[in-house]
Amino acid sequence: MSTCELCAAPGGETLWRDGLCRVVRVGGDEGRAFPGFCRVVWNAHVAEMTALPAADRRHLMNVVFATEAALRARLAPDKINLASLGNVVPHLHWHVIPRWRDDSHFPAPIWASGQRPAAAAREVDNAALAAAIAAVLSEEVAGE
Ligand SMILES: [Zn+2]
C-alpha cells in the first residue's frame, strides 16, 4: 500500500505512540486554522473500526479519549469534535479537533465552507500536550 499517505508517513508531528497506534499533531494550513488539531492513527493499514478485534477497538478509543481529555485540559476549547471518515484516505484514523466559537467554521464541521475569517492564532505547546496525553493514558493503565 505504498500509495497510502498514512502508511508512508506519520501524518503530523508524533506526540505519543505505541505498537498499535499514534497521536499526531496536524500541521500545515489545517493545523494553523484549527490549533491543537490531532489525529489518532492506527499503525496498520485497516479501513474500518469493525475490522479490528474488540480489544484493539477499545485500545484505539482509549487513546482517542485520552487525546480529547488532554486537549480539554490544556486548551479549554468551547467544544471537541471527534470524527472518523476515511473517504479520502481509507486508513483508520480519528480526528480530534478543538473548536472555538470564533474559529473560521464554527458551528459547521471544519470541512464545510468557512463562516468567517480565522480567529487570532492560539499557541499550543506540543511538548505539554504530549505529556498530558501520556499522563491520561498512564492513569488509565494504572487504574485497570
Ligand atoms: Zn495505510
Image (cartoon, rainbow, N blue to C red):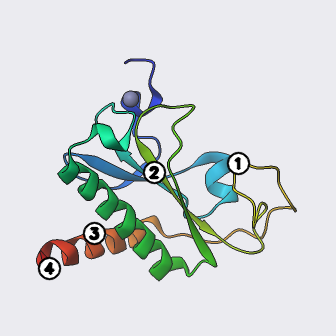
Q: Label 2: which residue?
A: 94
Q: How many angstroms separate mark 1 from mark 2 (CA)?
A: 14 Å
> Mark 4 or mark 1: which comes first in sequence?
1
Residue 143 numbered mark, or none: 4
79 to 116, vertically: above or below: below
Q: How many angstroms separate mark 4 from mark 2 (CA)?
A: 24 Å
Q: Quadrant of ligand 1?
A: top left
Q: Amino acid at mark 4?
A: Gly
Q: Label 1: which residue?
A: 111
Callout 3: SS: helix
Quadrant assignment for the C terminus: bottom left
Q: Label 3: which residue?
A: 134
Local crowd size for mark 4, using a 10 Å CA cut-off: few (<14), some (14–19), many (≥20)? few
> Mark 3 or mark 1: which comes first in sequence?
1
Tell me if the residue at label 1 has its CB under 8 Å from ligand 1: no
Q: Nearer the viewer, mark 2 or mark 3?
A: 2
Tell me if the residue at label 4 has its CB under 8 Å from ligand 1: no
68 to 76, vertically: above or below: above
Q: How many angstroms separate mark 4 from mark 1 (CA)?
A: 37 Å
> Mark 1 or mark 2: which comes first in sequence?
2
> Mark 2 or mark 3: which comes first in sequence?
2
Query: Which residue is located at x 60 percent, y 77 percent?
Result: 77
- The one nearer the camera, 57 or 114, is 57
Query: Which residue is located at x 45 percent, y 51 percent?
Result: 94
Quadrant assignment for the N terminus: top left
Query: Which residue is located at x 39 percent, y 17 percent?
Result: 2
